[in-house]
Image: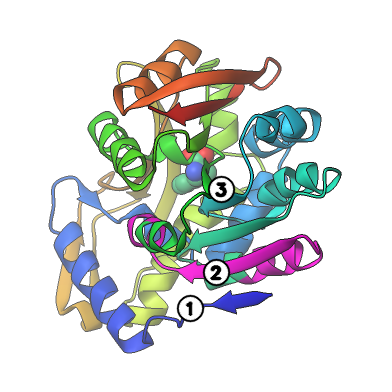
Amino acid sequence: MIETSAAAPPAEAVADFAEDVRRDLALSPKQIQSKYLYNALGSCLFEAICRLPWYRITRAEGRLLSRWAEPMVASLPDPLTFVELGCGSGEKVAMLAEALRSRRRSVSVHLIDISPIALELSERTLGRLEHVSVVGHRTTYEEGLRHAATLRPSGVTMLVLFLGSNIGNFDPPAAHDFLSQIRRALRPGDALLLGADLVKSERELLLAYDDPLGVTAAFNKNLLVRINRELLADFDLASFDHRAVWNAAESRVEMHLVSRHAQQVNIPRAGCTVSFERGEHIWTENSYKYTIEEVVQRGERAGFRSREQWVDGDARFALTLFVAN
Ligand code: TRP
């Protein structure tokens, strides 16, 4: 069974985008919210990033899931509902759902993503599994989670999946708030499986976020393509460079778009003209890197206890299963 909640009206989405762009390009430093990376083209570029030899997170997580999916779900009482925040292609949640099949345990899966492409791909992936029923929510994590929680019948255990390095895209106070919000949507005994990319060498980190094929650069610059197309702007793509910087003090990789020279850009639908100095940057994303201890502390401070942790020693990536207190 596949259901998808209605898409947001495009005119409204464009108006929100225009307002965010106008406000955030007036900040210092200039910013564009990273959620705008994931339109149809951006989602495909991110899928390509996940296949790059230098971006090892997705494969590391796939290895952990294919090896440990059974024990990850074994201890959770039936019946189960999975809620995946940011579902990508749906392959990860499918691996966990597969682990239930051998025991003839059925599961309902709520997919929450702002990208219609991600929902479509995931629904197709999960549609092949007979013991799985799927509900797609095209919305923000917060709203989708709230909605999924209200649809959950009593006596059903909820497992929230927040995988990849999604948590890394929140700064520490926002990560705390977000995990606390997940906790508030849950009941004692419900669970959270949290992915986190771990601190590693600067060289490895920069290759992951500024790859030699230029796919990550294209992914980042797609923000400008989107502003050109949707807000009728005149960004010259060749006048901006993608740059990834490792900020060791903050333990994060920062993504920027750097203006190669002084220039002005018109953004008619946002009602503004933006000036750039040479070398001035637009800050588009942070990707925080954790130690394994920090991951456990994060969850514990938000009202969970950690039950088990699986670490890919090669790529330095961790999955941690938390249970709500
Ligand atoms: N969540 C991903 C991460 O932090 C997003 C990402 C990967 C990303 N490469 C990027 C975001 C490049 C902006 C630019 O790993």
Q: Residue furthest right?
A: 102
Determine whether, in the image, residue 171 is placed left or right of residue 120.
Answer: left
Q: Name the secondary structure under disc 2.
A: strand
Lower sequence index among marks 1 and 3: 1
For label 1, the residue is: 5
> In the displayed structure, would residue 127 be above or below residue 292?
below
Looking at mark 3, is its residue's CB closer than 8 Å to ligand 1?
yes
Q: Nearer the viewer, residue 317 or 276?
A: 317
Question: Do the CB atoms of the residues marked 1 and 2 lie less than 8 Å apart?
Answer: yes
> Which disc number belongs to residue 135?
none
Range shown magenta: 120-145
> In the displayed structure, would residue 164 be above or below residue 109?
above
Q: Position of residue 85 (x, y in %)?
A: 49, 51
Q: Position of residue 223 (x, y in %)?
A: 41, 62
Q: Residue furthest front?
A: 155
**Residue 25: in sight, yes or no?**
no
Type of amino acid at the residue the image marks with label 2 = Gly
Type of amino acid at the residue the image marks with label 3 = Thr
Q: Nearer the viewer, residue 247 or 294?
A: 294
For label 3, the residue is: 216
Mark 1 and mark 2: Cα distance apart in space: 6 Å
For label 2, the residue is: 136
